[in-house]
Image: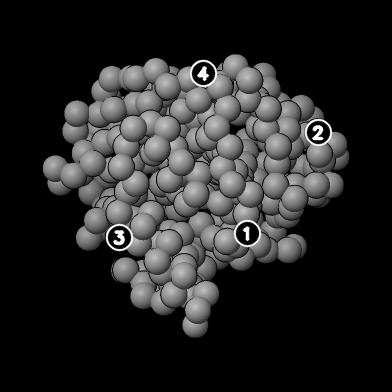
Amino acid sequence: MPVQSESLQARSPQVDNTADFIYQPPPSAQNAQRILVKPNLGYPVSPPVTVSMGVIAAVLAGLRQVSPHAEILIVEGVCSPVSLEKIASRNGLYALLDEGMQVIDADTLPLKEYLNRSPHPARFSSMFAPALLEEVDCRISVGAFKRTLLKDAPLISASLKNLYGLFPRSRYKARSANSRGQLHRPSVPLVLQDVYFTIGHLFDGAVVDGDRKFVSRDWKPDRGETLELGKVIWGDDLLAVDREACRVGGEETPDYVKAIELLRQQRGQA
């Protein structure tokens, strides 16, 4: 299957009102045989902690429009004792699926070791994630827009942080078997650099559900307050989409986005 490398020629991010959002998939989705969609559905909590069914429905409709016969695989790894099947059922995901779509728990998939393409790996020289990522024609990250606090510093979660759910808990767990504590050491912003250069660069598109922004008072990503934004931010490049989501949501661009952009430039010049 063709694998997209990171591209600086991707379409600029788009910002739509939630009610007007019509997803236009990247070129790799055109007449694709297999498409992977990674939604933020890791917690048994309703939006905006997780993505809304309205945004997911629009993404699936856009993909089906350009690929009528594609197998569309909705892949997520949960962060709680509640199974993905139960979370998807409670949120109404199964009602959106046609016969060519299926929901898959990332923790059940065969793994592959992905080399870190960064010129300066932060912690991991390689990371394990589903081999399926390189067995599809197109990969889309559909993230919620959240701000939490880790070590008294704000952490923005959007399309890139959403990819944490693809890493197996069996390998990256720490004190809790339900989470991926190893991916918090030495810090999430540093590990996100490795996430991008192992699997993030493979993704062809990103969608951030900014209908409401979730703001936590601490590190807990499932307890906090919500702020109305009424927007969906989407495009081909995860970093550009996350940067635009921060602008729309009144947040500073995260240091990890700036660091990855710099590393990507260095890699392109090498």
> Compared to 40, does 227 lie above or below?
above
State how far apart marks 3 and 4 are (Cα).
34 Å
How many angstroms separate mark 2 from mark 1 (CA)? 24 Å
Q: Residues within 10 Å of mark 2 (few under 14, many from 20)?
A: some
Q: Is residue 47 left or right of residue 22?
A: left
Residue displayed at 38% across by 31% down: 249
Which residue lies under the disc numbered 2? 65
Residue at image position (38%, 54%) is 257
Residue 93: quarter of image: top right
- Give the residue at mark 3: 190
Crowd around label 1: few <14 · some 14–19 · many ≥20 (10 Å) = few
Q: Earlier in the sequence, mark 3 or mark 4?
A: 4
Residue 96: x and y, percent?
Answer: 68, 22
Label 1 sits on what residue type? Gln
Q: In whole angstroms, how far apart are the C-alphas of marks 2 and 3?
A: 38 Å
Left or right relative to 224: residue 111: right
Find out whether the residues at labels 1 and 4 contact each other: C-beta distance under 8 Å: no
The residue tagged 1 is 9
| Image mark for residue 74 | none
Quadrant containing the N terminus is: bottom right
Task: Estimate the x, y position of residue 35 in percent, counting from the top left.
Answer: 71, 46
**Marks 2 and 4: which is nearer the front?**
2
Image quarter of residue 81: top left
Q: Earlier in the sequence, mark 1 or mark 4?
A: 1
Q: CA distance from mark 1 to mark 4?
A: 39 Å
